[in-house]
Image: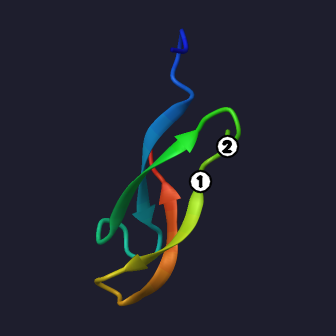
Amino acid sequence: MAKGKDVRMKIILDCTEAPGTSRYSTMKNRRNTTGRLELKKYNPVLRKHTVHRETK
């Protein structure tokens, strides 16, 4: 087992077009991806794919 801090951390992705309507959770490697993660995910309220950005 690795000692010290965990490399992978759990993050929440929130929709940028309609905040609060669609949220996804995923894991991210903090060594490889130091900035905020942005992914295109499906928003069921808007019924289309939108950009989802990592929240704090």
| Cα separation between marks 1 and 2 | 8 Å
Q: Residue 41: image x %, image y %?
A: 47, 73
Residue underneath mark 1 = 37
Q: Quadrant of the C terminus?
A: top left
Q: Residue 2: image x %, image y %?
A: 55, 14
- State the residue at coordinates (28%, 84%): 45
- State the residue at coordinates (30%, 65%): 20
Residue underneath mark 2 = 33
Q: Specify whether 4 is left or right of 31.
A: left
- Looking at the image, the residue that sits furthest to the bottom is 47
- State the residue at coordinates (36%, 90%): 47
Kind of residue sitting beneath label 2: Thr
- State the residue at coordinates (49%, 79%): 50
Q: Specify whether 39 is left or right of 23.
A: right
Dividing the picture into quadrants, the one containing residue 24 is bottom left
- SS at badge 1: loop
- Looking at the image, the residue that sits furthest to the right is 32
Kind of residue sitting beneath label 1: Leu
- Looking at the image, the residue that sits furthest to the front is 1
Give the crowd class for mark 1: few <14, some 14-19, many >=20 residues within 10 Å: some
- Rendered position, 44 above or below 36: below
Say whether marks 1 and 2 touch (CB < 8 Å).
yes
State the residue in front, 10 or 14: 10
